[in-house]
Amino acid sequence: MISLCLFTFFLASCWDQNLLVNKKMINGISFDLDQDDNILATVRALNIENKGGGQFEVKDELVKVKRPSVSGMEVDINNKLPGQIDVSKSHIILIGRDLAKKGIYPFLELFYRPRQAYISTRIVIAEDKASDIISLNPGTSPIAFVILKGLQAAENTTKIPKETAFSAWSQITDTGRDIVLPFVKKDENDKITIGGIDLFNGDKFSGISLPNEKGSLLLLLMGRLTKYSEMAVQLGERQSISFRVKKVKRDLDVKVDKKTKKITCKLNLTIGLTIISYTGKVGEKLNTDKLNKDLSQILTKQTDEITKSLLEANCDALGIGGILSSSYPDLWKKINWDKEYKNVKFKTSVKAKIDRTGPVF
């Protein structure tokens, strides 16, 4: 007992504790480019006040600061909000498209490098002004949590990629792959909706986007199916079909011609799907063979359009550069991939296999 008591004198105490009541927890922040090319940061912070007796009051506050660069913004925010600002715990980082075209690397650094960084912070692009979205007051809960719930639902159904401060930083610093990010927009009723996917070249927004359904197909081509993916396809003038994809087989092959040094990417995708709805003729027997063939042709055409968009955006979302660097290291050292990528020839095909017809029979 005497030894145990003496041993306690050598134990460290809680010298580095940070009380929540002394902090201003930022749950969402947006960055925009204003008309004078300054950076506008709009912050939503949770102000936790101790009322005594174990009672706390939480307020959602809005603060805006403006500077020529990112450096010093945290100081300005601290001056406007009492308490210690904790930017690293932000759930949402919204970046306006005008600013994203100039590069998002400096803004990721703010959230990636801190010792207590929250690596699950979602990175999202705003179709217009990000400050207009982060400034909304939905009434039910802070707007950052509303956006986060919408993103999580879209991620689970493979409508958008799940990109955090950690994953975005890793991809941007990887020369063999380009990042794609979800974008959100505000409708006429001030409701936030998922618009689709923005294509990036390095850390810069290319100006080219994919709507939701093409975005889902791109994620399947990238091998990023989550729980499932839902799509709808127009078969004819008055015929359409919607289906759910739960199984994907992906075959990606990159070859370099020995003589011409031209790069070819063959991508074959086989999807197992369940029909959700089908607007066929009343009483008509479902012809799964014909539907498989029609869907395969339509989806293959869509993948051709997607790869054209990738080349136009100079966005190597499929990671062809990474394959080249490992399989053809000598060639990789000689070429300028940022210029050579546009010359890649894609050959894509999608094979649809109806596993279940669901309520359709």
Image (spheres, rainbow, N blue to C red):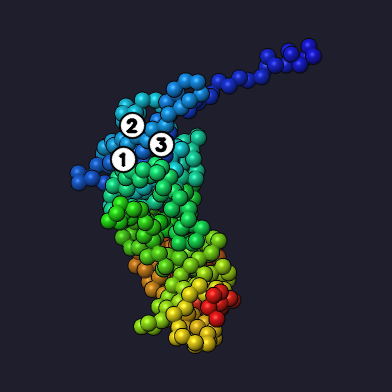
- State the separation of the CA atoms marked 3 and 1: 12 Å
Reply above or below: 13 against 361.
above
**Of the image marks 2 and 3, the number of the one nearer the N terminus:** 3
Q: Amino acid at mark 3?
A: Ile
Which residue position is annotated with label 1?
A: 41
Which residue position is annotated with label 2?
A: 77
Q: Residue at x 44, y 22 (%)?
A: 51
Nearer the observer, 248 or 277: 277
Q: Secondary structure at mark 1?
A: strand
- State the separation of the CA atoms marked 2 and 3: 10 Å
Do callouts 3 and 1 mark residues in contact (Cβ within 8 Å)? no
Left-right relation of 107 to 326: left
Which residue position is annotated with label 3?
A: 26
Q: Amino acid at mark 2?
A: Ile
Query: Whole-percent x and y of residue 90?
Result: 43, 40
Q: Taking the image as drawn, is residue 34 in sight? A: yes
Q: Secondary structure at mark 2?
A: helix
Do callouts 1 and 2 mark residues in contact (Cβ within 8 Å)? yes
Do callouts 2 and 3 mark residues in contact (Cβ within 8 Å)? yes
**Of the image marks 3 and 1, the number of the one nearer the N terminus:** 3
Query: Dot 3: few (<14), some (14–19), or many (≥20) neighbours within 10 Å?
Result: many
